[in-house]
Amino acid sequence: MIDKDARLFGKINIIDFFLLLGLVGALVGGALFLRGGGTILGGGETRTFILSFHTEETYDFNTVGVSVGDNVFDHILGNFLGTVYNVAIGPSVVWNADRYGNAVRSTKEGFYSMTICVQVTGTSSEHGVLVGGNRYGVGMGRAIRAGASAIQMRVSGLRDA
């Protein structure tokens, strides 16, 4: 199998063979890591979740463009996330400094805070949920399209449906 010149089957150097084998293993492991969303063995089980997105300040026209049942997409990645389960709209939240330098909460006319709950089918993982191969975890900023609106929001909650 290995000849006097340290060639495997008389064709390839044994050291080159192990380097090639290591490279192939690294490529396969990297592909599994990326496909599995960060774990070589893949994430947890696939099930339905409620993924909440929140923004403290969005234009008033964004609030009328979203309704329960609308499809939701990741605006940057383009992948389908799920459908709107619930929408909550409140006064905008704006933080400004008072004359003493203290942060003071106020609102801005024509702007609203908004929470969009989306029913998604995904795979649980250590740091959130994988939907369409992309991770969504609490605190992550995302631009989403829901109904007729495109809004920059943060993931504010994740729970089982």
Image: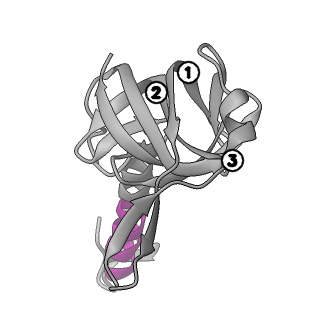
At a point 77% along the width and 31% down the height, the residue shown is: 148
Instruction: For marks 1 and 3, give the one nearer the viewer.
Output: 3
Is residue 118 visible to us here? Answer: yes
Magenta part of the chain: 15-26
Q: Nearer the viewer, mark 2 or mark 3?
A: 3
Magenta stretch, main secondary structure, is: helix
Asked if one can make out residue 153 in the rendered structure from this viewpoint, the answer is: no
Q: Earlier in the sequence, mark 1 or mark 3?
A: 1
Residue ID at (36%, 53%): 139
Q: Are marks 1 and 3 in contact (CB under 8 Å)?
A: no
Q: Crowdedness of circle 1 by 10 Å Cα count: few (<14), some, many (20+)?
A: many
Task: Name the one closer to the observer, 59 or 37.
Answer: 59
Between residues 121 and 8, which one lies in front from this camera angle?
A: 121
Q: Tag on residue 84?
A: 1
- At label 2, the amino acid type is Cys
Where does the image place residue 160, in percent across and percent down from the top left? Answer: 28, 21
Q: Quadrant of residue 130?
A: top left
Point out the residue furthest to the left here.
126
Label 2 sits on residue: 117
Q: Secondary structure at mark 1?
A: strand
Place of residue 35 in the rendered image (x, y in percent of width and height, measured from the top left):
44, 45
Left or right: residue 53 compared with residue 139: right
Q: Earlier in the sequence, mark 1 or mark 2?
A: 1
**Tags 1 and 2 in contact by the CB under 8 Å rule?**
yes
Element type where label 3 sits in the image? loop
On the image, numbered disc 3 is attached to which residue? 110
Q: Tell me if residue 9 is in the magenta stretch.
A: no
